[in-house]
Each structure stands twice: as C-alpha cells, then as structure tokens.
Image (cartoon, rainbow, N blue to C red):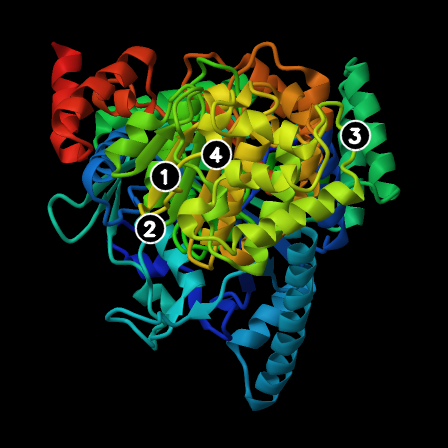
C-alpha cells in the first residue's frame, strides 16, 4: 500500500536560531524507573533490542517474521499509541585486552591494531512506545484542562495519568513479549557496582535520549532538574543542508545531514533497510508510526478512490490495491498509521559527510525509495528524531502496519557476548563481513563444546590456533590432538610440549605404571582387553576377562620397574594352553620385539601433563586401525584425570576418526554431557562433514556442541550440512559460496549464525606460527636441535631463517 502513500509536508514550527536547545526538547522528567513524561502530557517507554540475525536466514523465515510483526502492530493499534524506531549505527573501539605473555601477547597486540584500523561499527536498535493524549475535540479539551488545571482538575488528571501509565505498561509488555526472540528489554535505571559512580543511579532511557541530542555514547545520571535542560551539552548549528554539532572543545565537532523519504517504492519486503546496516558510516535512522483510527483510514481510502474516479485515472492496478487495502482494513488484517522516516548521516568533516550522503542516497535508491537531502526542513527533521516531537515531523505518509513491519524489521548482525560468559570475558573479538564486531565464545550457557569443519587449504588451522591463543587469557590446561604437525610450531611457541607418535619410535607410554587406584585398575582391565581382542572382533570369553583382571591385580603387586607387558604375557602363559588365539599370543605384538611394542612397552611411563599446553601429533596412529584405539584410550584416560575443575580445553583434529570405535561410544557420549560440570571444553575438527556424521559418536558430538565453525567449501554436501549439522539453506549456501581465500567462515552459535573474518594478511610471522607446513616444521626441528625448546631462544631464529 506504500505506493498509495498520501504525502503530507509541513514545517514543524522550529523556533528562532537563538532559542536554547531545551525549547525543542519535549521531556520533563522520569515518572518512574522506565517512563518519561513530556510537556504535552505524553508518556513513553523505550525498548532496546538485540535484533535478529538475517544474513544467513531463509527468506521464508524472514517473511514469516514480518507477518508476525504486522500482527503485533495490529494488536496495539490505537490512535493513542505511536511508535518510534531508531537504528543508531556508531563506531566502536572496545577490545578485550588481557595479560598475555610471549607469542600470545604479540598476536593480541597485532590483532587489536588491525581491528582498530578497520573502523568497526555496531547497530543499536530501539523501539519507543508512546502513549499520546486524546485526539480531536476531546483531546483539545484535555489539553486546555491541563493548562488551566485547578485542584479538582489535577485530581482528574492524576487519575487519567495513572490510567495512561497502565495502558502504556500493558502495550509495552505486549511488545516485549512478542519480540522476545529479538532480545527485547525495557530500558530503566541502574547503579554501577564499581568506579567513581558506584551506587549512583543512572538512566538507560536518558542515555538513549542523550545520544539523539548530543550524538555521543556515555553514561547519564538520573537528574533532579527538568530533562529538557539537563540532556543537551552540545550546541547544534544548522546551515542550509548541513548540521554542525559543537562540543566544549574545539576538536569536538561533528557534521551531519538529514535525508528524508520523498517518494516510497511500490512495496515493502522484509528487511527494507538492511542495506544501510552495512554502510561504513555513522548514522541514525528514525521512523515514526502513529496509529490512525480505522474509520478515518477507511474514509481516506474511499476518498482516494473518488479522486481517481473524478480524474478518470486509468490505473487499474492502483484501484485494485485500494479495494484490497480497504478489505484488509475492514477484515482486521492491517491497520494504518502516519509514517515518517529520516536518516541523519554523520562525518568528521564536510568531505566525509558528502561521501556518506552519496552512499546512503544510492542505497535508498536501490530500495526503490526517493530520498532528498533536507535544506529548509533540516532543523525540523533533526528535532523530529526525538520521541514525542510529533509537531516537528516535516514529511509523513499514510502506510499500513504491514508496510511498517517491513521498514521496522529489527534485523541486525549478531554481536556475540563480550562479558558475563561462563568463563567471564569473551575469547576474542572477530570482525564480521558487515563491518561489525563479534564477541566469540566457545560457551553457550555452561556448555562449551565446539566443532570446526573445513577442507584442507581453507585456513582451518589458523582459525583454530588463533582461538586457542586468545583463549590463553583464561590460563586453561590445553591438550591438542594434532594432525600433520599443523599446530606444533604454535604449541611450542606458547611454551607447550609436543610429541609426535611415530611408528617404530618409542612413545614413552607405559599404562601399567599408573598409580594403584580403583579407577586405574578398571581402566587397565578395559585397555588390556582391547590389546588382546580377537582380530575378528568376537567378544572375549569370561575366562579371558578373569585372566585379564587377575593380571591387573598381579601387576600392582610387583615393583614399578617390573610393570611391563612382557611380565603380563608370562602370567597369561602360566594360566592357559599354548595357542595362536591365546591371550599370550595376542599380546605378543605389543611387547619386546613385537611390531607395536614401541607404543606401550617402555621402561618408564614418560607421559606427563606438566605444561599448561600439551600437543600430540596423531597423523600416523590415526591410520593404524589396530593401534589407534588403545592409544586414544590411554591418552583420554590421562586427560580425564587432569579435569579437576580448573579450566581446560581439549581439541581433537579428525576426532571422529580417532574415537570411532565401540570402546569410546558410550564414554564419549557421557563425557560430552558431563565435561561442562568439570569446567572443560571439548573441540572436534574434521575436513569432511560426511566423515563426521558417519562416525558412531557423530550425532552426540553435534548435539552437545553449541558452537560450530564451518570453513568455505564449494563442494559442501547439502544433506550433510543441512540435515546432519542443522544448517539453514542460506547458511549452507554461504559455506558453498565463500571463497577459499576470503579468510571468512561461518560461526553457528546457539540460535544465531554470523559470517566472521580473520584477516591476518601482511602478518607473515604470525601465520607461520599459527599454521605449520612441512618445511617450517622441519626448520623448527633443526633450530630446536641447536638451541633447545625455549621459544625465546628458537622463535627469533625461526623467523630470521625463514626470511633468509
């Protein structure tokens, strides 16, 4: 119905240039923690919204949400209600610094610098619900009564104010409930718990209003003086087309220009203004929607039809739209209101401002909207941004609630959660493709398991080691099960220890030397059973299990130096007949001169987790179907013992393959559910989504991993990604269409998803550490042989020789 909008223009009574700013502000005071009163007797409350992620949402979902918003607007439709919707796009520079050391400190410093150079923006969304005075002759009488109030009238007015406040609270509650999935919350008052203002009451509502007046984001105390005099601290100067907002210092100057909609397009879809949410400029988009009584709207539609008849207008489609609109109005499917939209674009200087105006006009034109840069109406448009300042609205049009549901979509880009997470601050701050910051966390609530899926060459290792480096702010125990030694340089660079499990090279593992505890005895029984399991996977007999249990008991009755597999083999031989299928025969490959003796038949158990970070390269053992399971059983048993409540991160590259065995199925399923109680995080990586899903534990890992990272993959299988991992069609398309060299990836966290970018271009030294290659790992081996394992000794030489 927007193409039938009835334009109305009037210059909203802007006062002389010498008038104080307070003369243009309608606010008087807080009448309670959440409600502001105006000079005209209006009341309003402000709702802040996180918004809903739209970038990777299916269009059908967005269309459905638009229809739901239309239903919401109809539910509160009353000529006494009006809505203001503000989008404040502003620059941010907050970065979660931490006390890193060594390589992690250097990485953090360079990443913070890169983000600072990017000029990141956030989109703050607000919805103001206004309870207006009565309209028409009744409203005029009400206004006169307010001005000439006597004691009796004051009592009646107080009763009316109480009724209005009740109606406003009900309407706002309705809106907040309906917009719960948008993160809607009513703004109120608060008292900081620390700092110079500790215990002093502040107002979130006044902080919002202060930004509209002064265009600066800062805390605002609750005052004892009238709000119209308290809020402004900058002076607006209005030129022909340009606003200059001056602060106290000479450098505190901002330039602005206002764009208004002159002509609306033929229709409104879901997310009409989404393109403006990506612009690299600061701006404030203001919309009002003041509901009009149904009868008045119907008369206006009928009048428009009569005008077309008189003019013998042959526009058949417009006649049909008028009839449809009238039918929808009478049927209660839409409601009408007076709509106004302006965009205040800002710049540090006039040249920057002109570029920003050009960008905004071009984007609005692409949306089918004809925008004009205000000149004569410029000052009125500035004051019209303030909730309650209806008299300053210079351009308005009659639109339907369905149209407004398209303009006020509350779409946004997820920001993540910067503070107040399970481990405190976020892991790191990432850049999104929309130029907004994203506070990344492993945890959603108290569950922090995650997956990383992506083919080789897409930057998976860089993303993973970067996140592990940033997570060192929590000083966690970290265990990294690696593949192809891709993370070795990084692990050693942060002071960690790293072991390569290589065939024929003793690992230093000897599980038989574990301390004597009931848990370790139970483990050894299961572990030995795996060593001697028949090749055809037939179950062990009860006799076999009894002999294994006896062998474990006997093991702990001997000295530590005698706890070797060869000794157990002798015990087996003494209790069974010689046979190729005897336990002794099946144990033979694992000790002495056996082909897998290098794995566990070692003089001393050298496996220690005495460093904060420990890495293992599993490249060779992953392809050893026989040796893989007992090796992972021992490693996981030892890792399980360090999960004592202190923060811990365990990552397993190609974890589905490493643990795809009946011996792990129930244990991993249980561990995935209980690791959060032990303050741990478990991560899995894979080059293939299909491989992950085909694993015995694949479904459990996906179900218990609230954070999923998907690298670009133009060969991504739709069934695996959509049905297996639960991606929407748009999310799947994003994974397929992202370039391998884009440095972008999709993060799906809880209920939202976002396209993030980790752009470390130009940081060759960082990249060489974060992702090892065959030649750099070989260089590392040479240098460590010369100077040892201390990264302060080998890392400078590593970079020097790489560049030589």
Callout 1: helix, strand or loop?
strand
Residue lying at 64% horizontally and 25% vertically, measured from the top left: 692
> Contact (CB < 8 A) between labels 2 and 4?
no
Q: Mark 1 points at which residue?
A: 614
Front label number (3 vs 2): 3
Q: Earlier in the sequence, mark 2 or mark 1?
A: 2
> Contact (CB < 8 A) between labels 1 and 4?
no
Compare residues 485 and 293 and report the one nearer the observer.
Answer: 485
Q: How far apart are marks 2 and 1 (CA)?
A: 13 Å
Report the side of 710 relative to 242 (left or right). right
Evaluate whether residue 87 shows in this view. no
Q: Residues within 10 Å of mark 3 (few under 14, many from 20)?
A: few
Vertical position of residue 484 compared to residue 514: above or below: above
Q: Name the residue under label 3.
A: 538
In the drawing, what numbered circle is on residue 600?
A: 4
> Contact (CB < 8 A) between labels 2 and 1?
no
Q: Which quadrant is the C terminus positioned in?
A: top left
Q: Earlier in the sequence, mark 3 or mark 1?
A: 3
Front label number (2 vs 4): 4
Report the side of 500 relative to 370 (left or right). left
Callout 2: helix, strand or loop?
loop
Vertical position of residue 650 compared to residue 319: above or below: below
In the drawing, what numbered circle is on residue 475?
A: 2
Compare residues 516 and 123 and report the one nearer the observer.
Answer: 516
Vertical position of residue 310 compared to residue 678: above or below: above
Q: Which of marks 3 and 4 is nearer the N terminus?
A: 3
């Amino acid at each position: 119905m927007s193409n039938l909008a009835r334009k109305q223009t009037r210059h909203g009574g802007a006062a002389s240039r010498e008038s104080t700013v307070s003369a243009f502000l309608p606010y008087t005071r807080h009448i309670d923690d959440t409600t502001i009163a105006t000079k005209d007797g209006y009341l309003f409350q402000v709702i802040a919204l996180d918004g809903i992620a739209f970038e990777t949402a299916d269009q059908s979902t967005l269309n459905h949400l638009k229809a739901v918003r239309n239903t919401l607007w109809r539910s509160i439709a009353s000529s006494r209600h009006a809505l203001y919707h503000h989008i404040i796009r502003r620059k941010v520079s907050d970065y979660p610094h931490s006390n890193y050391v060594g390589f992690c400190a250097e990485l953090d410093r360079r990443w913070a610098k890169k983000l600072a150079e990017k000029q990141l923006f956030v989109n703050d969304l607000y919805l103001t619900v206004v309870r207006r005075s009565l309209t028409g002759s009744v409203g005029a009488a009400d206004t006169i009564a307010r001005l000439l109030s006597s004691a009796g009238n004051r009592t009646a007015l107080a009763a009316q104010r109480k009724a209005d406040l009740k109606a406003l609270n009900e309407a706002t509650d309705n809106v907040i409930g309906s917009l719960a999935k948008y993160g809607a919350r009513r703004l109120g008052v608060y008292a900081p718990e620390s700092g110079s203002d500790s215990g002093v009451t502040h107002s979130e509502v006044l902080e919002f209003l202060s930004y509209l007046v002064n265009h600066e984001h800062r805390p605002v105390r609750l005052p004892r003086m009238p709000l119209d005099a308290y809020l402004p601290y900058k002076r607006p100067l209005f030129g022909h087309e340009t606003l200059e907002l001056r602060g106290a210092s000479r450098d505190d100057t901002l330039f602005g220009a206002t764009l208004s909609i002159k002509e609306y397009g033929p229709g409104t879809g879901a997310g009409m203004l989404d393109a403006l949410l990506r612009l690299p400029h600061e701006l404030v988009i203001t919309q009002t929607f003041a509901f009009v009584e149904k009868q008045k709207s119907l008369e206006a539609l009928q009048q428009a039809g009569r005008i077309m008849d008189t003019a013998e207008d042959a526009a058949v489609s417009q006649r049909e739209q008028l009839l449809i609109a009238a039918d929808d109005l009478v049927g209660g499917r839409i409601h009408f209101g007076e709509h106004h939209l302006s965009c205040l674009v800002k710049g540090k200087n006039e040249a920057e401002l002109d570029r920003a105006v050009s960008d905004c006009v071009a984007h609005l034109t692409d949306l089918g909207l004809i925008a004009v840069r205000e000149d004569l109406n410029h000052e009125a448009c500035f004051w019209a941004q303030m909730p309650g300042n209806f008299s300053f609205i210079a351009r308005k049009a009659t639109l339907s609630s369905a149209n407004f549901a398209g303009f006020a979509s509350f779409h946004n880009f997820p920001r993540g959660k910067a503070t107040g997470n399970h481990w405190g601050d976020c892991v790191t701050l990432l850049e999104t493709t929309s130029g907004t910051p994203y506070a990344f966390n492993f945890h959603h609530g108290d569950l922090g398991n995650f997956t990383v899926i992506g083919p080789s060459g897409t930057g998976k290792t860089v993303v993973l080691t970067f996140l592990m480096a940033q997570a060192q702010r929590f000083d966690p125990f970290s265990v990294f099960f690696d593949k192809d030694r891709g993370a070795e340089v990084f692990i050693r660079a942060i002071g960690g220890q790293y072991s390569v499990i290589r065939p024929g090279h003793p690992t230093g593992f000897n599980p038989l030397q574990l301390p004597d505890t009931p848990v370790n005895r139970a483990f050894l029984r299961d572990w030995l059973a795996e060593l001697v399991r028949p090749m055809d996977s037939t179950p062990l007999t009860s006799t076999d299990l009894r002999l294994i249990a006896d062998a474990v008991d006997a093991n702990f009755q001997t000295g530590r130096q005698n706890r070797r597999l060869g000794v157990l083999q002798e015990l087996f031989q003494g209790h069974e007949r010689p046979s190729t299928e005897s336990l002794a025969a099946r144990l033979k490959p694992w000790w002495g001169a056996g082909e897998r003796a290098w794995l566990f038949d070692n003089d001393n158990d050298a496996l220690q987790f005495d460093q904060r970070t420990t890495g293992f390269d599993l490249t060779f053992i992953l392809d050893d179907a026989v040796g893989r399971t007992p090796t992972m059983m021992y490693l996981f048993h030892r890792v399980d013992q360090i999960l004592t409540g202190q923060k811990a991160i365990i990552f397993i590259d190609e974890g589905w393959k490493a643990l795809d065995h009946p011996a792990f199925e129930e244990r991993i399923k249980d561990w995935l559910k209980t690791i959060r109680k032990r303050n741990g995080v478990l991560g899995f990586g894979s080059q293939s989504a299909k491989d992950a899903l085909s694993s015995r534990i694949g479904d459990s890992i996906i179900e218990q991993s609230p954070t999923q990272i998907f690298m670009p993959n133009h060969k991504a299988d739709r069934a695996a990604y959509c049905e297996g991992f639960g991606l929407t069609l748009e999310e799947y398309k994003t994974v397929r269409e992202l370039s391998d060299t884009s440095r972008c990836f999709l993060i799906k966290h809880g209920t939202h998803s976002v396209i993030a970018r980790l752009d470390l271009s130009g940081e060759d030294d960082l990249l060489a550490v974060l992702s090892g290659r065959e030649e750099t790992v070989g260089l590392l081996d040479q240098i460590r042989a010369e100077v040892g394992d201390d990264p302060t000794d080998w890392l400078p030489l590593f970079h020097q020789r790489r560049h030589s």
